[in-house]
Amino acid sequence: MLMADYLKPTSSGILLLIHLQPRSSKNEIAGVHGDRLKIRLTAPPVDSKANEELCEFLAEKLGVSKSRVRIVRGEKSRKKDVLVEGVLLVQALSSISG
């Protein structure tokens, strides 16, 4: 299995290391930026709009409820660590790359 630097297994799910680009023309996974998964979102980085949209985007991509997606580090930064509960590493890799 291909291992991605931006994806770490945890006892409750996975930890995604994200590089976020707000105010993009569309919501998309845009490849890898260093050791992080680059995600572009249309939301602006004000009033937590980009953070909320990121959680919604990842929940939809990974097939979990939004309540299972939580930013654990980097709320005010482009570099974010996001915990997704109830997802296996294999599921996450196929959902993100497919």
Image (tube, grey):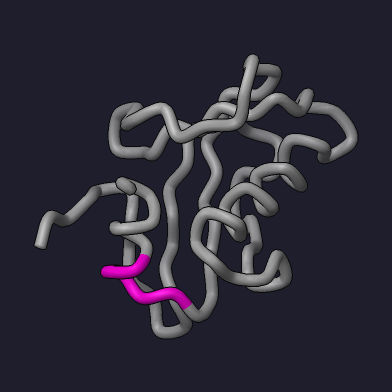
Residue 21 in percent (x, y) is at 58, 24
Q: How many labels does the image show?
A: 0
Query: Compared to 38, does 67 lie above or below?
Result: below
Most distant residue in the bottom direction? 11
Q: Which residue is drawn at 70% across and 18% down?
A: 23
Q: Give the range drawn in magenta.
A: 87-91
Q: Is residue 97 left or right of residue 43?
A: left
Query: Compared to 82, does 42 lie above or below?
Result: above
Place residue 67 in its image quadrant. bottom right
Q: Residue at x 76, y 28 (%)?
A: 43
Residue 4 in percent (x, y) is at 23, 50
Q: Residue at x 57, y 53 (%)?
A: 58
Query: Compared to 9, does 55 lie above or below?
Result: above
Towards the viewer: 85 or 56: 56
Most distant residue in the front direction? 98
Residue 42 in percent (x, y) is at 70, 25
Towards the viewer: 6 or 93: 93
Residue 32 in percent (x, y) is at 32, 31
Q: Is residue 89 magenta?
A: yes
Towards the viewer: 81 or 90: 90
Q: Which residue is drawn at 82% across and 37% down?
A: 49
Q: Is residue 18 left or right of residue 26?
A: left
Quadrant (top left/top right/bottom left/bottom right) for the N terminus:
bottom left
Q: Is residue 9 magenta?
A: no
